[in-house]
Image (cartoon, rainbow, N blue to C red):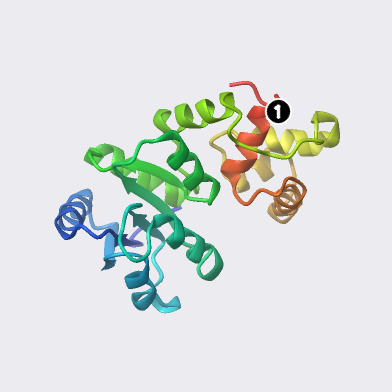
Amino acid sequence: MLHQNQTIKLALVDDHKLFRRGLKSLIDMLGPQYTVIFEADNGKDLQTKLTPENAPDILLLDINMPEMDGFSTVKWLNVHYPLIKTLVVSMIEKEETVVNMLKLGIKGYLCKDVEPKELSEALHSVYNKGFYYTDFITGKLLYSIQQDGEGYSGGLTSASFNDREREFLKLVCSELTYNDIAVKMSLSPKTIDGYRNALFEKLNIKSRVGLALYAVKHGLVQL
């Protein structure tokens, strides 16, 4: 949660300088709680500018970029800076692209014609909840599930999980944070981390989005 006088550090990665300039102006309009600490042209440029000392809270990332695109950039971030929350801002709306980026662990997906109000909501949600899922994203995920495009290996059914794991999976599909889930289940945050990591390993999944997709696809949660 953002405290008084605390600022949310942002970084912009997009090869279109004019769009970056417009996005930065939009962010400046949102108020002093947001500050853009640096900009980069692509993933390669990001690698030269990003250090542990100037790591942003949220990285706003394009997908189509020369030298190192959004997919490769997110994969690199997952290894070297896993705590940075990535929010994609792109013109691409293809289901496959959106779902594949979500599988990599991005925290939200916005179109480049985003309105100031939605950008503010997205930044606030990603910072405080850890994700921002719009109807646009939900629609793409459900389409992917219906087309059986998720590709999880079979063999695991509802009976493969204990009651606590099933309860945890259902709550993962809500807007509750992991800390909220801990309170809801009367468990410590550390225990909740244990459930999450165990399910990541069991299901070969790397993100909360992946857990939610699995739960919906296998009937553990009804939308």
Q: Which residue is mark 1?
A: 218
Residue in view at x 84 percent, y 35 percent: 160
Q: Is residue 166 above or below residue 28?
A: above
Answer with the quarter of the image where residue 155 lies: top right
Q: Where residue 198 sits in the image (x, y, percent)?
A: 76, 51
Label 1 Cα crowd, 10 Å radius (few <14 / some 14-19 / many 20+): few
Residue in view at x 29 percent, y 57 percent: 33
Q: Nearer the viewer, residue 23 or 147?
A: 147
Q: Secondary structure at mark 1?
A: loop
Residue in view at x 60 percent, y 36 percent: 150
Residue in view at x 50 percent, y 44 percent: 100
Q: Where residue 3 sits in the image (x, y, percent)?
A: 40, 57
Q: Where residue 93 sits in the image (x, y, percent)?
A: 36, 36
Residue 29 is left or right of residue 162, and the answer is left
Q: Nearer the viewer, residue 125 or 221?
A: 221
Q: Return the residue found at the far top.
A: 222
Q: Nearer the viewer, residue 70 or 127?
A: 70
Which quadrant holds the C terminus? top right
What amino acid does circle 1 point to?
Answer: His
Q: Where residue 88 sits in the image (x, y, percent)?
A: 37, 49
Residue 16 is left or right of residue 207, and the answer is left
